[in-house]
Amino acid sequence: MDKFDKPGRACCSPRRDNAHAPGDAACVPVPITPAAALDHGHARRPGVVWFDGGATWLGTDAPVIKADGEGPRRTIRLKPFGIECHAVTNQRFAEFVAATGYRTDAERFGWSYVFHAFVAPGLATETPESVPWWRSVPGACWAAPEGPSSSLAGRELHPVVHISRNDAVAFAKWCGGRLPTEAEWEHAARGGADDRRFPWGNEEPAEDAMVYCNIWHGRFPDLYIGGDRRFGTVRVDDFAPNPAGLYNCSGNVWEWCGDPFRVKSLSSAGRARDRQAVLDKEYTLKGGSYLCHRSYCYRYRIAARTGRPSDTSAGHTGFRVAYDLSST
């Protein structure tokens, strides 16, 4: 078996389980009306890159983590679509919450997953055995990323995190969009260009310099050597954009897609991963995060992918919004 060809080998957060499900009437989602979509025109929607329809491809013929279903490469036909240059920021999500009163899944559950290095002593309630660098922290949510003692001060233009797929869908509906499909996300991340490994090309990020993207530098999960950069999220416009003008399609935060996560593979590891995805009703995430490292979670490549149930949230998971041409 390949060193990476193992289901679940990732920096990704664990799943929620029924024992942690909320049990009161406050868990009923707030209805979202897409009022903000009514005045958006194609030429007037800022921060969106538009792509023509046509043939593109999904996946790669050189998969690294085969159990994730990265390959083989297959041809997909896309309709014209738009996708935002940046992941949704804390500032924008705060505007959404102020306008709608929306409560995220993390808020309704009363907790979310926080990376161990960010957790104040005595605050965590659980350390998942399969991914012991995560802690379930009461009160952790988009507005308090490390728990009740934390805030968004200085992080207004960082990507919003602790976002479940359910939350991302609600925001996208409110602003007249939707989540991108995996094929749209890959096409946009490549800039519609060749079969490149990363948004900037094929050059691997250097271990001792953060030139291309925000990923882990050092020995995961207990030694970070990123120089003067504090690990964690960075602004959504940090680092150079790809040829199409999209920022941070590698690293920073995982991004939800609209597709169910499925693995088409004949390997035993791939079949096991697919069974788990079907059982847990998982959806696709792309892009990797600030916790990815080549030695452990080499998922900041364009073809890389993972999946989680739609109510899962963590401190490295966000999203960006896509649009149909007809919606403009």
Image: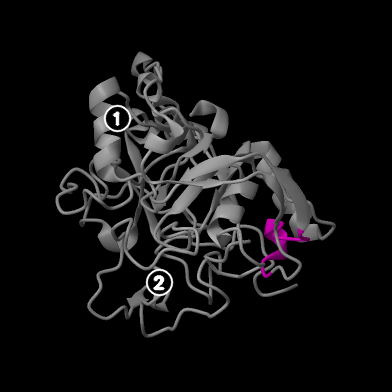
Is 162 or 206 nearer to us in this picture? 206
Q: Which residue is drawn at 32% across and 27% down?
A: 103
> Horizontal placement of 66 versus 189: left or right?
right
Are discs 2 and 1 less than 8 Å apart at CB? Answer: no
> With 11 as the anchor, is 7 left or right in this view?
right
Q: State the image coordinates of residue 132 (x, y, percent, origin top left).
A: 44, 60
The span picked out in magenta is 64-73
Q: What residue type is labelled 1?
A: Phe
Residue 172 percent across, percent down from the top left: 44, 32
Residue 139: tell me if it is visible.
no
The answer to whether residue 96 is left or right of residue 246 is: left
Q: Which of 45 and 85 is in front in this view?
A: 45
Tell me which residue sits at (26%, 59%) in the image: 118
Mark 1 highlights which residue? 96
Which mark identifies residue 179?
none
User: Which residue is found at the position 29% from the left and 61% from the top?
Assistant: 234
Q: In which quarter of the image is residue 276?
A: top right
- Label 2, on which residue? 216
Q: How far apart are marks 2 and 1 (CA)?
A: 31 Å
